[in-house]
Amino acid sequence: MALPYTIQIRPVKDESGDYFFASIAELDGCQSNGDTFAEAYESLREAMEGYLTVKLEYGDVILEPIGEDEYSGKFNLRVPRSLHRQLVERAAAENVSLNQYCLYKLSK
């Protein structure tokens, strides 16, 4: 329960009304909801406790949290030559490296 799992809580508006949907990314099916953010969080913590109890009881595998060290910060991306040229030209016009320019564009 104390491990740093990725908790996701988002507001939802649908035919059943307004509420918050909560889930844990690494624990497939571990989810809950609540009328407020706090209720959704508390409800998710209860769901997580039940989820982990059942998994342990049946000897099922429990995935560990995804840590920041799982990501190198690098990935390869193939683009058409024409787009590559445009990106290089725009980076040069901004007087920055292609890497800096792409990082700026991706972070928007």
Image (spheres, rainbow, N blue to C red):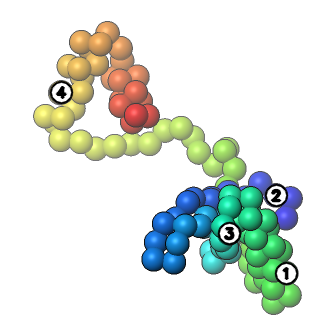
Q: Residue 86, position in %: x, y?
A: 18, 27
The residue positioned 62% from the left and 58% from the top of the image is 8
Of residue 1 and residue 62, the one placed in the foreground of this image is 1
Q: Earlier in the sequence, mark 2 or mark 1?
A: 2
Q: Which residue is mark 4?
A: 86
Element under label 2?
Answer: loop
Q: Are marks 2 and 4 in contact (CB under 8 Å)?
A: no
Q: Residue 14, position in %: x, y?
A: 46, 72
Q: Amino acid at mark 3?
A: Gly
58 relative to 68 in the view: left or right: right
Mark 3 Cα shell of 10 Å, populated few (<14), some (14-19), many (≥20): some
Q: Are marks 3 and 4 in contact (CB under 8 Å)?
A: no
Q: Earlier in the sequence, mark 2 or mark 3?
A: 2
Q: Earlier in the sequence, mark 2 or mark 4?
A: 2
Element under label 4?
Answer: helix
Q: Residue 7, position in %: x, y?
A: 68, 58
Q: Earlier in the sequence, mark 3 or mark 1?
A: 3
Quadrant holding the N terminus: bottom right
Of residue 78 and residue 47, the one placed in the foreground of this image is 47
Q: Which residue is mark 1?
A: 53
Of residue 80 and residue 47, the one placed in the foreground of this image is 47
Point out which mark residue 34 bears: 3
52 relative to 78 in the view: left or right: right
Element under label 1?
Answer: helix
Rendered view: 79 above or below 33: above
Q: Residue 89, position in %: x, y?
A: 20, 19
Quadrant holding the C terminus: top left
Point out which mark residue 3 bears: 2
